[in-house]
């Protein structure tokens, strides 16, 4: 009977240890637009994210109005004219780590991953595959990704008089620390 109880405790401990979720409400997402006329950069430190280590599920939710710009006028134009933040208050990614078996969440290390899922921006949802890196260190992971987003793919209208100042493809960077819960 002792062996059975001990075996069950070890199995239960292993299961709950593997079924860990990592989350944050202070995730960092930035974007960069580069043209010969002007560079535009914005930062957001209010993104929420959760990664389920057992299933490989990944969810990022980015409040659009939380992007901060160097110039207040850029921020105003971004929210009112381009992203229509009142109508589309968030952007999100919902998907999976496609190569989950390559990530040892219980072992410190750096793991290259591919994320497959739905990226929704400006009310438009598109299936995407994104490269990323997960760095495991103790009870935290750092999730990083760098990818390009075409404004036209998400029906973001750029007026002709601003078209030379805003890139058609925007570089997005994610660098977020998530804690195990």
Image: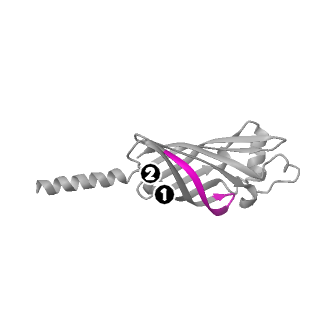
Determine which quarter of the picture holds residue 31. top right
Q: Is residue 30 left or right of residue 71?
A: left
SS majority, magenta: strand
Q: Is residue 128 magenta?
A: yes
Give the vertical position of 48 relative to 155 (above or below): above
Where residue 122 appears, as percent x and y from the top left, is 69, 57
On residue 18, the disc is none
> What residue occupies the far right of the structure in this picture?
161
Q: Which residues are magenta?
A: 120-134
Q: Quadrant where the N terminus lies?
A: bottom left
Task: Check disc 2: other Cα within 10 Å, few if <14, some if 14-19, many if 20+.
Answer: many
Q: Is residue 156 left or right of residue 176?
A: right
Where residue 104 appears, as percent x and y from the top left, is 41, 49
Q: Residue at x 78, y 47 (%)?
A: 77
Q: Residue at x 50, y 59 (%)?
A: 98
Q: CA distance from mark 2 to mark 1?
A: 8 Å
Where residue 88 appears, as percent x and y from the top left, is 68, 56
Q: Residue at x 68, y 52 (%)?
A: 148
Q: Is residue 151 left or right of residue 127?
A: right
Of 6 and 110, which appears nearest the observer? 110
Q: Residue at x 76, y 37 (%)?
A: 71
For disc 1, the marked residue is 99
Judged from the image, the secondary structure of the residue bearing numbered disc 2 is loop
Where residue 142 appears, as percent x and y from the top left, is 50, 43
Would you say the residues marked 2 and 1 are in contact, meaning their CB atoms lie under 8 Å apart? yes
On residue 103, the disc is 2
Of 28 and 83, which appears nearest the observer? 28
> What residue occupies the far top of the structure in this picture?
70
Determine which quarter of the picture holds residue 41. top right
Judged from the image, the secondary structure of the residue bearing numbered disc 1 is loop
Count of numbered circles on the image? 2
Task: Check disc 1: other Cα within 10 Å, few if <14, some if 14-19, many if 20+.
Answer: few
């Amino acid at each position: 009977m002792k062996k059975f109880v001990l075996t069950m405790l070890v199995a239960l401990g292993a299961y709950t240890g593997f079924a860990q979720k990592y989350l944050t409400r202070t995730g960092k997402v930035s974007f960069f637009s580069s043209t010969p006329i002007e560079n535009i950069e914005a930062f957001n430190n209010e993104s929420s994210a959760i990664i389920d280590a057992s299933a490989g599920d990944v969810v990022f939710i980015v409040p659009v109005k939380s992007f901060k710009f160097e110039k207040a006028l850029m921020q105003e134009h971004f929210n009112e004219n381009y992203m229509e933040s009142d109508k589309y208050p968030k952007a999100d990614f919902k998907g999976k780590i496609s190569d989950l078996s390559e990530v040892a969440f219980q072992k410190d290390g750096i793991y290259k991953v591919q994320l497959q899922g739905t990226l929704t921006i400006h009310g438009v949802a598109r299936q995407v595959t994104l490269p990323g890196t997960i760095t495991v260190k103790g009870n935290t992971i750092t999730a990083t990704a760098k990818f390009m987003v075409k404004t036209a793919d998400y029906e973001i209208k750029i007026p002709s008089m601003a078209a030379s100042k805003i890139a058609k493809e925007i570089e997005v960077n994610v660098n977020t620390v998530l804690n195990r819960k």
